[in-house]
Image (cartoon, rainbow, N blue to C red):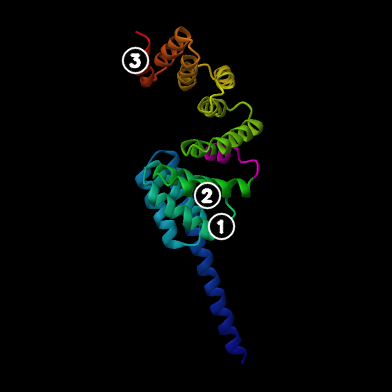
Amino acid sequence: MKKNALLVLFFFALHFLQALYGQEVAVDFLAEGQKYLDQGESKLAMQAFNKAIAQNPKNHMVYYFRGFLKSTLKDYRGAISDYSKTLLLDSSAADVYNNRGIARENIKDISGALADYSKAVKLKADFSEAYYNRGIAELKQQMLKESLEDFDKVIKLKPSFAAAYNNRGINKGMQGLLIEAMLDFNKALSLKADYADAYLNRGNVRMKMNLKEDACMDWSKAGELGSEKAYEVIATNCN
């Protein structure tokens, strides 16, 4: 009887050590993959993450980093698959929902992206990046009321975020609120003086307000800062 008990204890201890050893190996490969990812060695990072998953398929962080790597390689469907596996293992990760939303948006799955951003902010009420991403997706869908509310939320959480003012300005311009849009573009430029898109967008609003000379000056500045679209607008409107 005592011998049988010792055998059971031995096999239990052996199983525990094997599981522990496997976990440690997976964590080592994860750290190796992160190191290669930081160094821009995508192929080596992918190999390390694959090895980590082979050793321990329940380590949710490996799927997360492999999904991130796939996104940087523009393998958005592969990234979505890995982020989904991460969420099966840890459904409380707001960052993963946000990242999966970005990947979904890149394959034109806007409704799926909106659902993910909404889940992210539900899990993390002060998640400014997810509110911003949802606002952009809503803007693409002409959901102007919802988009405006999200940009307002972002600005409340992160008042120095120039891109939020720029995109709120676009939203207001689409609603015909031209003076309010102008104020948002001005604010964006006060926060980021080399913001080509804000100059471009302010120029668009100024043209709608029949301020052609000012509009052309803004578009010219946007062009100097690298906006190719600005020169197209100048060719059409400023000659």
Label 1 element class: loop
Q: Is the magenta stretch mostly helix, strand or loop?
A: helix
Identify whether 103 is placed above or below 7.
above
Label 1 sits on what residue type?
Answer: Asp
Q: Which comes sooner in the sequence, label 3 or label 1? A: 1
Q: Quadrant of residue 165?
A: top right
Left or right: 217 as drawn, with respect to 17: left
Q: What residue type is labelled 3?
A: Thr
Q: Does the magenta stretch include residue 167?
A: no
Classify 10 Å Cα crowding around label 2: few (below 14), some (14-19), many (20 and above). Answer: some
Name the quarter where the C terminus is drawn.
top left
Q: Is mark 2 on a helix, strand or loop?
A: helix
Tell us which disc is closer to us: 3 or 1: 3
Residue denoted by label 3: 236
- Secondary structure of the residue carrying numbered label 3: helix
Q: Mark 2 points at which residue?
A: 115
What label does residue 176 carry, if any? none
Residue position marked by numbered label 1 in the rendering: 90
Quadrant of the image for the N terminus? bottom right
Residue 177 percent across, percent down from the top left = 56, 23
For residue 106, side relative to residue 202 (left or right):
left
- Residue 18, relative to residue 123: is it above or below? below
Q: In the image, which residues are magenta?
A: 125-134
- Residue at 54%, 35% (x, y): give it: 144
Q: In this view, does 160 lie above or below 108?
A: above
**Mark found first going from the N terminus, 2 or 3:** 2
Q: Where is residue 4 in the image (x, y as percent from the top left)?
A: 58, 88
Residue 68: horizontal and vertical position, in percent? 45, 46
Q: Which amino acid does label 2 sit on?
A: Ala
Q: Percent from the top left, x then y, of residue 118?
A: 57, 47
